[in-house]
Amino acid sequence: MKSSKPNYYSTWDFIKSYNEKKSKGTLHKHESLLEKDFSLLVKNSDKDYYKEDFIFQQGNKSPVESFLTYFEIGLYPPPSIMAAIAESFNEYYFRKGDSTLEECFFGSSTKAVGNNSSLSDREFKFQYMFVTLNDETEKLTQIDAAEKVITKLKLECDVDTFLRQYRRYKKKTGRLDISEIKKKF
Amino acid sequence: MDDKKENKELSEFTFEEFEQDSWAWGQNLEAMIRQRKVKELPINSWKYVNQLRDEMIEDSDNLESLEPAWERLNELYDGIFERIEDDHSFKLPIDELIYQVSSGFYPRPELLVAVVSCFERYFSNKGEIELEEAFFGKSTKRIGNYSALQSSHPDLKLLESLVRRSKSPFSKKKGIKPLTLNEAAEQVINELKLDIDPESLLRKYRRYRDNKD
């Protein structure tokens, strides 16, 4: 029978249970190895991004969204998120065709369009930032423009994180056409 | 109008084709594109990952690049995971990522980016494609989805996987000798408790492999 819920590994329950196991020292061997490597990444990075709370903040609705957020700010995700992605794929293979990948990650009740409404916002918020930043009448700094977008779109995100994401989005997307983007607003 | 006509001529890319070409998947992509068997470079493919790798190495000075983090990790891993061109131990990039994470290693950055790109393709298409399609191409009615396809012939898939993994850079580094088909067949029989001798299993495997080719 197909479940309307995503598989366990694609939920926050898995992440919470992972963190509990971590604090009790009962992680699986491969998870402990990842944690060891992760300490090296933490040492060389902005530690705030790797605080446990950060995973749940930034408006992420699932471990997959958190996975994408880390990538957007140019960081390897923490082990719990890496494990959530790998285990979800393992679960998909284990179900041998009984579930689609979409059902496995997001549950059968949330089809792509539903899911997408929150995640396509990822692109929208960066386009909105681009328009705000290029507003000739206001001439805002990057920080001011980011604050304005975060407030206007009610994003659960801090300015630094948002700016890192925006810079990477722009770099990846290349030259943005202001007149094309303005048509969307 | 011309564009429409051109698109109509392209045959759809299915799991079945994907499976048939699995052995030479990365290498055959260019030919498949030329023959218009695929519309664009599939993201979850070695060809795409290799392209990403080259771009990422070139862009390694970028402050927010994953490359410096990978260099530190790879040093910790004694350079086990070489970023080689053609000798891939896994059929798909996602399989290498799953294997590495499940073995306690962080994956090479290009594998991470390939997986992220598949999710992004799914989300940016606003419901027009399934997540399954973003990762594995279109499913076929006869077989079902990619997970169903993978579960057919579990004995032969395990055999392939054992041989492939024994040849992986990780195994090489650990001094594990590559398995012969015979040795792999014996392992499969023991693991799956099959009532069959290695020779018969290998005959079955050769028939399966020849049909695939």
Image: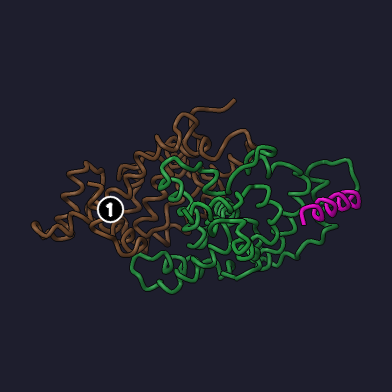
Chain colours: A brown, B green
Residue A154 vertical placement versus B118 (above, below): above
Measured as percent of width and height from the top left, residue A108 is found at: 50, 31
Can residue B170 be seen?
Answer: no
Q: Is residue B200 left or right of residue A133?
A: right
Which residue is at 64% across, 37% downward? Answer: A97
Measured as percent of width and height from the top left, residue B160 is found at: 75, 54
Q: Is residue B167 left or right of residue A165?
A: right
Q: Is residue A38 left or right of residue B13?
A: left
* Nearer to us in this view, A153 or B35: B35
Q: In this view, does A27 lie to the left or right of B175?
A: left
B210 magenta-colored? yes
Quarter location, residue B147: top right
Q: Residues within 10 Å of mark 1 (few under 14, many from 20)?
A: many
Q: Which residue does the numbered mark 1 point to in the structure image?
A: A126
* Nearer to us in this view, B56 or A20: B56
Residue B87 vertical placement versus A92 (above, below): below
| Quarter of the rendering occupied by the C terminus of chain B | bottom right
Element under disc 1: helix
Q: Main secondary structure of the magenta part?
A: helix
Which residue is at 25% across, 43% downward? Answer: A156
Which residue is at 53% across, 55% downward? Answer: B6
What chain does mark 1 sit on? Answer: A
Boundaries of the magenta span: B198-213
